[in-house]
Amino acid sequence: MPVSASSWSFTEDDFGAITKALERFLADCNARCALLVDRTGQLVATVGQRPDFDPTAFATLTAADFSANDQLAKLVGENDFSSLFHQGEKESMYLADVARRVILVVLFDSRTTLGLVRIKMRQTVVELTQLFEIVFARGGSAEAVPNILAGADDEIDKLFQ
């Protein structure tokens, strides 16, 4: 069962390593943009050319798409589909599972080919899976992230007394 982003967090070093991996991937395959989405539909990161759409809504739809395809896989006798491809007239996207909890989405156009994206995506998924497994093993205990909302409930209650 997927774990939501609320049960894990990044350190600055984690985020830097993930961002570098995605930047290298985009440069290697000449794709436009990479988005990381957790399985609950939360946008984790966006690297590359800023999309012309609402990335938060896109993240939600991406998670729903991946979830629906998991069910389709079961109907045809597979456990899941680890990757999906959607081809458009001008734009295409390739989605891949990372560590069973995150979805990597790459947006690309005619400047590259599906074959190159797929080859480079495999390498990147392996690298990201290793990075995310470290993050998930730590759980929500990233020491570098202070709880800035601690005590906020008490302060709000005082306002209404």
Image (cartoon, helix red, strand yellow):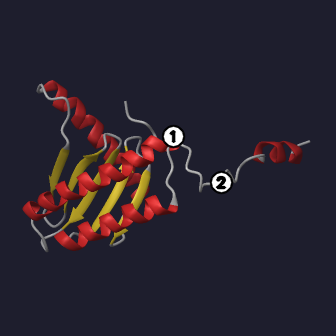
Residue at image location 20% in from the left, 66% down from the top: 108
Name the residue beneath numbered marker 1.
7
- Counting the numbered discs, the total is 2
Answer with left or right where residue 142 lies relative to residue 16: right
For the residues labelled 2 and 1, the Cα–Cα distance comes to 15 Å
Residue 159: % across, % down: 87, 48
Residue 51: tell me if it is visible: no
The image shows residue 144 at horizontal and vertical percentages of 59, 56
Q: Is residue 98 visible?
A: yes
Where, quadrant-wise, is the C terminus in this rendering?
top right
Q: Kindly identify which numbered label has been placed on residue 116.
A: none
Q: Earlier in the sequence, mark 2 or mark 1?
A: 1
| Quarter of the figure with residue 89 | bottom left
Q: Position of residue 124 (x, y in %)?
A: 24, 58
Residue drawn at the location 51% of the way across and 62% of the way down:
12
**Secondary-structure class at tag 2:** loop
As drawn, the residue found furthest toward the right would be 161
- Give the residue type that dot 2 points to: Pro
Residue found at x 42% / y 53%: 43
In this view, 71 is above or below 88 = above
Q: Which mark is residue 146?
A: 2
Q: Nearer the viewer, residue 63 or 122?
A: 122
Amino acid type, mark 1 = Ser
